[in-house]
Every structure is written in C-alpha cells, then in structure tokens.
Image (spheres, coloured by chain):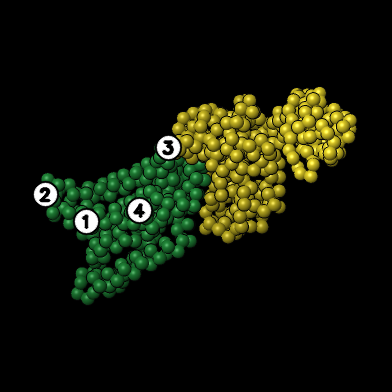
Chain colours: A yellow, B green
C-alpha cells in the first residue's frame, strides 16, 4: 500500500506570484497530518490542488492512487473536503443539505437517511438538524462542514483550518472528533497554529513561503531538536580583583564540555551566561563547581530545550531558508 | 443525469425561497398583465394573445437577468462553488443543472399567464393553435434568455454586474439587432437579421413553428451554455 496522498514537486503560479514552489510530501494511510504554516504560505492552494479545484502549474499529486488532474472525479470521490470558512447554502436546512451532499457524493438513495443520521450523531448536530444553515452559529456551521466531509465515509479527509473561529470548548470537541477519525481515515488538516497541530496530529508538514520546510513525525521532530542550552545566572562578590565580567566568562568557558558562552549583563552585578554544551556533554556539574570554587552567588542554573514552538517561530518569522538549513 | 436532476432540484427550491425571484416574477406578471389588458383583452379585438407574446420578447430582456443573476455568481461569492466543484460532479453537470433550474423556474413564472387564456375563452372564442405555438415560442425564447443569463452569472461574483451583463447581451441580441440590420451595408444586413431574436421569434405568435427558428434558439442556447462551462473551467488556467 503506497501513500494515500503523494505530492511531488508541485508548483503553482497565480499570474506572476509564486504561491507554491516545488512542494513534495506524502501522507501514509490512517495518519493524521498537520499542514502547518503561517497565513499565505500556500496551504490553501495546496489543498485546493489536492481536491481538484485548482490545477497545479507544474508537478504531480496523487490521492488514493489517482492523479488529481487526470482522474479528478475518482480523487473527488475519495476525498471529504472542508474548505476554509466552510461555505454552505444558507437557505437549506441542515438535514436537507447533508442529504443533498450525500446524493452528490454517490451515496445510494436508500442509504442516504442512515448516512445523514450517522454524521449528525457524530458531529453533535441532533439539536439543529431541522434548522436553517444560515441561522447557525460559527461553531455549528463548522460541524456541518465536517459532517458534510464525512457523509460518504471517504478514505481521505482534507480539512482547511478546521478549528478557526471556534470557542475553546468547541475547539476541544472538534479536536477530539478529528482524533477519533484518524482511526479509519487519512486526515490532512491545515493550520497556522502549532499547538493545534501538536494536539491532534502525529505528523507534520511545515510550509513557509510556498516551500516545504520540514516534514516528519512530531516525535522525531522533538528528538531532532535536541540542541539545548544551559542558562547560568551568577554574581561575583563586589570589589574582588580578577573577577570582572570578562574573567568570569573565561572561567565559565573553560569548564569541560562547554563549547560556547554568551554573556549578558542583567544589572545590579548579575551576569547571565548562556552556555552551549558540546554534543552529548552535560557540563552542569562542572559549572556548579566553578561557581562554588570562586564563591560566586548563584541564583539560577537551568537547562533550556529548544522547542518546536521556537523552531516554528523561526520559520514563520520569514527565515525559511535558514530553518531549512538548520534542519538538514 | 441523476446528479443533474439532484442539482436542478436544489436550484429550483433555492429559487422558491429567494425574495428576488418573487420580485422578478411579480414584476413580470404586472407588466405582462398590463400589456394584455391594454392590447389583447379589448372589445372588438380578435380573441388572441399575439400582442402579449410579441411584447414578452422585450419584457423578458429586463426580467430574466434578474432571475438568473445569482445562480453562479452567488456560489462564487459565498465560496460554495468550491464545495460544489470539489464534489464528484463535472462542470458540465453543474452548468446544465443551473440552466435547467432557472428555465423551469421561468416556466413556472409563465404558468399564471394561462389565466389570460381563460379570460379570453370566457369572453370570446380564441384560436388555440396560435396560442399553443406562441407558448412554444415563449419557452424557446426563455431558454435562450436564461442560457445567456446563466452565462453572464458565471463571469463574476457580483450579482448586479451579472444582471447588467446579461441585460446588455440581451438588449443587443433582441432590441438592437433589428435596428442595426436596417442601417448596415447590404452584405451584412442578412447576417445581422438572421442573428436577431426578433426574426426568429415573431413567427411563433402567428401560429408558425418553423424548424429553422427552433434550431436558432436551441443552438444559441447550447452555445451560451458551452461558454458558461468554459468560464467555469477558466479558473484552471487563470
């Protein structure tokens, strides 16, 4: 069994604007993958290409083994798609809309009522099933969109910003629902928030400025970060000779396992040293000994892990190229 | 075909909950009733509907663009076009359903005018042949106007622009062309005359159903719908 979604070297130009620049990634069966990137990174464009709404300028994409351009109808039958902002017909009733969409998606006429009931249960729409879509709150509209994506029980779900605009309780519910979908469906969801992706997805594709910057499982990514710093805040007893800031930094730098020291004045005599340890080394003990030997006052000694958040911030700050390099 | 019917049904039911469709319908019935009372339903006149059939050609130029303006432009504006076109349906099926839905709504709009016939029958002795052929003509005329309206609606996400575009195309085709035919030099005269709606429409109200006229309406409607499909597909290369 190959990948459910396979994207190869996909590019998209809108006139003279390059929205997507040679993107490649793949999504395996039954994975929940977060498509993470800042606004205007090319997320929606990619999803629109995958669902056959827009063609790519160049490159290839396959969903469920079908080419999105040549076998567009087969792809569309295999995908449940919830576009951003969930466009719906305001004049239809929830139930009526879902029945209509079931018909469009080839659910046989006799199975439609059951299919509608199933998604209404699944997306907690029972109380509003007879209501007009136009009168629903944002949260309910979102659920109708999700119910619509699920109606034909497709193997692949593509959700564009599924929790945007929801209140915290609704976000919880939708996340929970998406997680439960991952057992039987392949899910690709886009988001511009890392926490969102961390809560629901097992894998992530990070995109910035139309380029795929990083892909992989969240776990691997956390491990791969690895790089840590040690933060040390000390103060030398005032007036003692040979204990100027530069000497202190030199002393810290001589501890075994330390490769780099950055010093900051915190005022009132306090010095902060940010220490980069050598790979695999843990110089915390050595640092403590230096402090004790010299009789400095210690107020902080801690390990600082580089976080995904930090990495993602770096990427969203527009430093895509640098992030790609540091990831490689 | 099953999907076309499903989409058509949704289209029609959305017409019947739209206030604008009712406004257009009322407008149409008021104006056409006015002309019927003034021109056809008078003592001493033959019990026929010729004048009303003829004047419909002009009334509908104003009414139909209002009926069709929202059918694709609203989908484009609200984004439902994306959900629609990412479902397993072809662009052609969508356009066909949009057209059928609007055309059936138009036919429903015509239905109350049968009351004129009842009135004529009550007070006179109408000839049913020309009335029947007149309605055939109206159905075909509406087919063309609706197809052009749907095309105009596929070009923009703004309903007003869609209505005006449809209106302009219809004005040129139905009202300007007969006049143009009388002023252009000879070799062009025949071409413009044949392209004009009036040339092919007026025979119907006189009881003549000419195949040439039927072909004109059907072919031109089909062409407008073909262009509509292309306009939808244009998102792929724009």
Nearer the observer: mark 3 or 1; the answer is 3
Q: Is residue A225 left or right of residue A152?
A: right
- What is the crowding at mark 3: few (fewer than 14 residues within 10 Å), some, or many (at least 20)? few
At 64% across and 28% down in the image, what residue appears?
A326
At 62% across and 52% down in the image, what residue appears?
A165
**Camera-nearest residue between B180 and A257:** A257
Q: Which residue is mark 1?
A: B176
Q: CA distance from mark 1 to mark 2?
A: 16 Å
Q: Does label 2 lie on the same chain as label 3?
A: no
Q: Is residue A4 something one can see in this rendering?
A: no
Q: Which residue is mark 3?
A: A16
Q: Which residue is mark 4?
A: B149
Looking at the rendered structure, the secondary structure element under dot 4 is: helix
User: Sequence-wise, which precedes: disc 2 or disc 4?
Assistant: 4
User: Sequence-wise, which precedes: disc 1 or disc 4?
Assistant: 4
Looking at the rendered structure, the secondary structure element under dot 1 is: helix
In the image, which disc is placed on residue B185? 2
Looking at the rendered structure, the secondary structure element under dot 3 is: loop
At 57% across and 56% down in the image, what residue appears?
A133
Looking at the image, residue A239 lies above or below residue B145: above
Looking at the image, residue B31 lies above or below residue A135: below
């Amino acid at each position: 069994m190959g990948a459910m979604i396979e994207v190869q070297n996909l590019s998209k130009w809108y006139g003279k604007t390059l929205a997507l620049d040679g993107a490649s990634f793949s999504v395996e069966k039954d994975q929940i993958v977060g498509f993470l990137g800042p606004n205007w990174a090319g997320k929606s464009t990619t999803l629109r290409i995958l669902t056959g709404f827009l063609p790519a300028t160049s490159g290839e994409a396959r969903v469920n083994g079908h080419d999105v351009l040549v076998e567009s109808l087969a792809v569309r039958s295999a995908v449940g798609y919830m576009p951003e902002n969930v466009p719906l017909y305001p004049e239809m009733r929830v139930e009526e809309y879902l029945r209509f969409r079931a018909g469009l998606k080839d659910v046989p006429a006799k199975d439609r009522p059951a299919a509608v009931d199933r998604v209404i249960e699944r997306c907690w729409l029972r109380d509003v099933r007879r209501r007009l879509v136009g009168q629903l709150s944002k949260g309910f509209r979102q659920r109708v969109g999700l119910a619509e994506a699920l109606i034909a029980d497709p193997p692949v779900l593509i959700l564009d910003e599924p929790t945007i605009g929801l209140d915290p309780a609704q976000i919880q519910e939708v996340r929970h629902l998406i997680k439960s979908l991952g057992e039987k469906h392949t899910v690709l969801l886009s988001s511009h928030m890392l926490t969102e992706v961390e809560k629901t997805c097992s894998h992530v594709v990070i995109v910035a400025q139309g380029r795929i910057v990083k892909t992989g499982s969240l776990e691997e990514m956390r491990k791969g970060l690895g790089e840590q710093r040690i933060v040390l805040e000390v103060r030398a007893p005032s007036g003692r000779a040979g204990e100027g800031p530069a000497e202190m930094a030199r002393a810290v730098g001589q501890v075994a396992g330390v490769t780099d020291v950055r010093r900051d004045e915190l005022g009132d005599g306090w010095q902060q040293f940010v220490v980069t340890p050598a790979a695999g080394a843990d110089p915390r003990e050595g640092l403590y000994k230096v402090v004790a030997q010299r009789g400095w006052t210690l107020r902080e000694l801690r390990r600082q892990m580089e976080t995904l958040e930090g990495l993602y911030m770096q990427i969203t700050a527009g430093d895509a190229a640098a992030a790609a390099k540091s990831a490689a | 075909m099953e999907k076309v019917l499903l989409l058509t049904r949704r289209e029609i039911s959305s017409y019947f909950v739209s206030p604008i469709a009712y406004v257009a319908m009322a407008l149409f019935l008021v104006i056409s009733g006015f002309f019927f009372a003034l021109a056809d339903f008078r003592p001493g006149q033959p019990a026929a509907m010729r004048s009303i059939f003829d004047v419909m050609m002009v009334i509908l130029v104003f009414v139909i663009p209002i009926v069709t303006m929202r059918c694709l432009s609203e989908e484009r504006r609200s984004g439902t076009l994306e959900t629609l076109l990412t479902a397993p349906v072809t662009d052609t099926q969508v356009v066909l359903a949009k057209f059928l839905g609007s055309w059936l709504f138009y036919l429903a709009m015509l239905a109350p005018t049968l009351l004129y016939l009842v009135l004529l029958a009550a007070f006179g002795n109408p000839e049913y042949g020309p009335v029947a052929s007149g309605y055939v003509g109206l159905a075909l005329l509406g087919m063309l106007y609706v197809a052009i309206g749907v095309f105009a609606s596929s070009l923009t996400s703004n309903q007003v622009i869609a209505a005006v575009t449809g209106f302009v195309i219809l004005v040129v085709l139905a009202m300007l062309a007969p006049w143009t035919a009388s002023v252009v030099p000879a070799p062009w005269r025949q071409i413009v005359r044949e392209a004009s709606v009036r040339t092919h429409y007026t025979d119907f109200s006189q009881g003549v159903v000419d195949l040439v006229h039927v072909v004109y309406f059907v072919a031109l409607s089909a062409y407008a719908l073909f262009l509509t499909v292309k306009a939808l597909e244009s998102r792929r290369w724009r």
